[in-house]
Amino acid sequence: MTTEYLILARAVHFGACLLFFGIFAFDRLVAAPILRNDRIEAAHFWRSRLRLFSLLLLPVMLISGMDWFVLVAMNMSGQLPQLEVLKTVWLQTQFGTVSQIRLLVWFAAMAVVASMFSVKLEDRFPKSPAWLQFLLGGLLLGSLAWAGHGQEYSRWHLGADVLHLLMAGLWPTGLLPFAILLRRLSRAPEPAMVPIIHLVRRFSALSLASVSLLTLTGIINARYLVGSLSNLFDQPYGRWLLVKIFLFCVAIAIGAINLLRLKPKLSAADSTAQARQVAAAQLQFNVQTELVLGVIIVMIVAVLGILPP
Amino acid sequence: MKNIPFKRLGLVAVLFLALQSHAWAHAFLDHADPKVGSIVTGSPAVVKAWFTQELEPAFSSLQVTDAQGREVDKKDMHLDDKDKKLMIVSLPPLTAGTYTVNWQAVSVDTHRTQGHFEFTVK
């Protein structure tokens, strides 16, 4: 049963770290520039969602991280979680050192959340908390590379793994905040097409860059961890990786439809209001499908972390 | 024209994967001294076991037992200062016979593996 719990704890922890970074990355790189000069209530809605996600995700991150730590300690020692074993893992192993650093970053992120609820601070430094959370979220997510297969071969492998994690935080994780904001903008009494078009345009550019780097870093990781084409088919690790690659390709195909078919319909000067709304609805459906694929991919990543390549 | 970058990317992917590379993310025994299954003349002073990954000394172990299953090493297993993939344990002078080396390796990626091998002192 420990293995199943370990997979679950890893999946929840990875998911929470991805979402935390992904939401603030989306805010800084996509949403904030669009909503900056906008007095529509979407801007207020978005800021309240940022606070809500922070409040929800940080406790999930802590609890799942603690579960993960205890289960890894059991795995390393081959014993039930006794205080002495937990202390040894915490103080004498690389996983323990990484966990200590990540806990400090988590406390910093909690302090920033507290500042987000301070009206005085928010008025004086409106952008600082979001930039800080973007940075701290990146540290929490990227540092996962030191707690897995990423640090085993070379600095190139480690760098590729860190970048792979961060890019996954931009896409497909960024699809969730994108879907939330798109839904809000589309459901306004008079859908504001200009911010929707800007939103789709900016997110498309970010997704393209992210998918390219995800592919490149994924290939580098696979070269180090899988080694050869035959291992992809012969080993359980390789087969799970193939499923992940397949789902990734399906998500990319859906993304290509969004980019090549729906985005032009949304932004074409000769599109009617009705055609744009239909395209926006189709886009929402596609994004939700990609999100489901993203959740399955995170589960597979949790499995890959405990399998020997 | 739009498909060309994807084709190039696919080609790069195939080339990367087609090239053989080292692929052991858990710590497995790579080689040992005395060699696995070897017959040595005279008692070795230490047993050295090289693994495929860096190890966590707090949870890794290397024990040498005689044919009756009694531990005969000096219980001073440690990692080499310069090579964190190398476990070393000292031995007292051994009499002729077959000895079993039991190892448990916890790699820095937190995974635990274990195994054993034998060597014979002539």
Image (spheres, coloured by chain):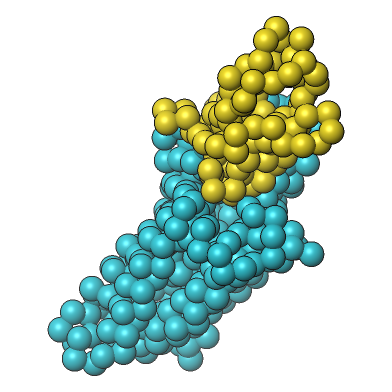
Chain colours: A cyan, B yellow
Kindly identify the residue that appears in the image at 62 percent across and 68 percent down. Answer: A82
A193 to the left or right of B42: left
The front one of A112 and A37 is: A112
Kindly identify the residue that appears in the image at 20 percent across and 86 percent down. Answer: A121
A105 to the left or right of A119: right
Q: Looking at the figure, which quarter contains the N terminus of chain A? A: bottom right
Residue A38: give x, y in percent of width and height: 29, 81
A198 to the left or right of A153: left
- Residue A202 drawn above or below residue A233: below
The front one of A177 and A190 is: A177
- Residue A274 drawn above or below residue B88: below
- Residue A4 drawn above or below residue B74: below
The front one of A180 and A191 is: A180
Kindly identify the residue that appears in the image at 74 percent across and 63 percent down. Answer: A2
- Residue that sits furthest to the left in the current view: A124
The front one of A84 and B109 is: A84
Residue B93: give x, y in percent of width and height: 64, 20
Residue A61: give x, y in percent of width and height: 51, 72
Residue A233 seen in the current view: no
- Residue A233 drawn above or below residue A271: above
Q: How many numbered discs, if any? A: 0
Residue A101 seen in the current view: yes
Q: Looking at the figure, which quarter contains the C terminus of chain A? A: top right
Kindly identify the residue that appears in the image at 67 percent across and 46 percent down. Answer: B112
- Residue that sits furthest to the right in the current view: B68
A55 to the left or right of A287: left
Residue B119: give x, y in percent of width and height: 75, 19
